[in-house]
Image: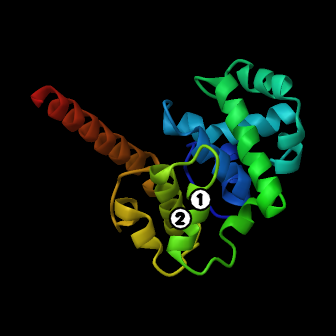
Amino acid sequence: MATKVHLSQRPEADELLGRSPLAALVGMLLDQQIPMEWAFTGPYTITQRLGSDDLDAHEIAAYDPERFAALLSEKPAVHRYPGSMAKRVQQLCQYLVDNYDGDAEKLWKGVDSGKELFKRLNALPGYGKQKAQIFVALLGKQYGVRPEGWREAAGAYGEEGSHRSVADITGPESLAQVRAFKQEQKTAAKAAKAAK
């Protein structure tokens, strides 16, 4: 899969994200209520703390939950809510072990439609409709995973030339554009709420 990405804005973390399907899935899982770069640096931080150079779904799923939560809580914490996110990462890994032999890439390898890809991602623990759509867009735009209908399955996140999500981040400039878009969305949502 080895792809050059700039999701975390840190070369060593981005290198892992570019070659490890599980790292990319975990980064997307962590991408909530914290800055995107922090979320996508998380998988690299976890590998470092496990003393490994890659994430292994079998190893993480089997890890003692309290010890895994402590691992994610070490300073600097992997997430603002390291305990609950440790649980979610383990649930994700267990799901991959149970359904895909622990191989995250099997989620999209050989999938024949964007609709099926979305369905598989949407079924993942910790993933909802929006996260699944963003990941479909990320796979299509940056990882070359483009089953028929992937843009439609990704919704607005699949639009060419958009700057809506992590799927559109290719460097510092596009990160700033995505941030600006998200800020506009928040401002518009607040204004709409205030108008009610």
Mark 2 lies on residue: 118
Q: Give the quarter of the figure containing the C terminus.
A: top left
User: In the picture, residue 85 is in which quadrant?
Assistant: top right
User: In the picture, residue 159 is in which quadrant?
Assistant: bottom left
User: In the picture, residue 112 is in which quadrant?
Assistant: bottom right
Name the residue: 36% across, 52% down.
164
Q: Relative to residue 111, is residue 192 depicted above or below?
A: above
The answer to whether any part of residue 1 appears in the image is no
C-beta proximity under 8 Å, tags 2 and 1: yes
Neighbour tally class for label 2: few under 14, some 14-19, many 20 plus, Cα within 10 Å: many
Q: Secondary structure at mark 2?
A: helix
CA–CA distance between discs 2 and 1?
Answer: 5 Å
Q: In the image, what residue type sits under mark 2?
A: Phe
Name the residue: 74% across, 68% down.
106
The answer to which of 7 and 112 lies nearer the viewer is 112
| 15 relative position to 137: left or right | right
Q: Residue furthest left?
A: 195
